[in-house]
Image (cartoon, rainbow, N blue to C red):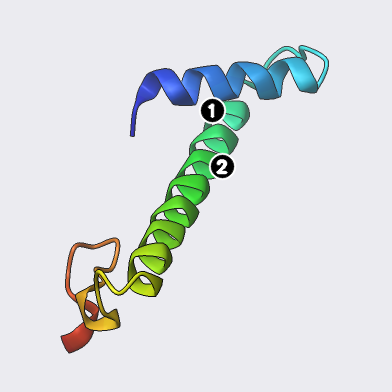
Amino acid sequence: MDEDRIRDRAYAIWEREGCPDGRHEAHWEQARRELQDEDRLARDRRARVLADAGDIGPEDLLHPSGRNSGGI
């Protein structure tokens, strides 16, 4: 994951929480989790749009691990 995105999100979290001292690690981890979740949701939405359009079938969807969902 792009560290610049994590840094920007962590900074936004820090500001939103009133700029507290000593919480940089917690803000970094929260930012990383939020972005990871957002990326996963965006991939899922794209896959659903493609599947609905008939461009791909459910068997063509890949798990985040990169393995095909058909044989797992």
71 shown above or below 67: below
Q: Where is residue 67? Give x, y as percent.
A: 17, 70
Q: Where is residue 55? Give x, y as percent.
A: 25, 69
Under circle 2, the secondary element is: helix
Gap in angstroms between the C-alphas marked 1 and 2: 10 Å
Whether residue 49 is visible to the viewer of this picture, yes or no, is yes
From the image, tell me which residue sits under label 2: 34
Q: Looking at the picture, which amino acid does disc 2 mark?
A: Glu
Q: Nearer the viewer, residue 24 or 45?
A: 45
Q: Circle 1: is it few (<14), some (14-19), or many (20+) Cα within 10 Å?
A: many
Place residue 54 in its image quadrant.
bottom left
Badge nearest the viewer, 1 or 2:
2
- Residue 28's disc number: 1
Identify the residue at image location x=29%, y=61%.
64
45 shown above or below 12: below
Is residue 1 left or right of 26 when viewed as pictured?
Answer: left
Q: Looking at the picture, which amino acid does disc 1 mark?
A: Trp
Q: Where is residue 41? Give x, y as percent.
A: 49, 55
Q: Circle 2: is it few (<14), some (14-19), or many (20+) Cα within 10 Å?
A: some
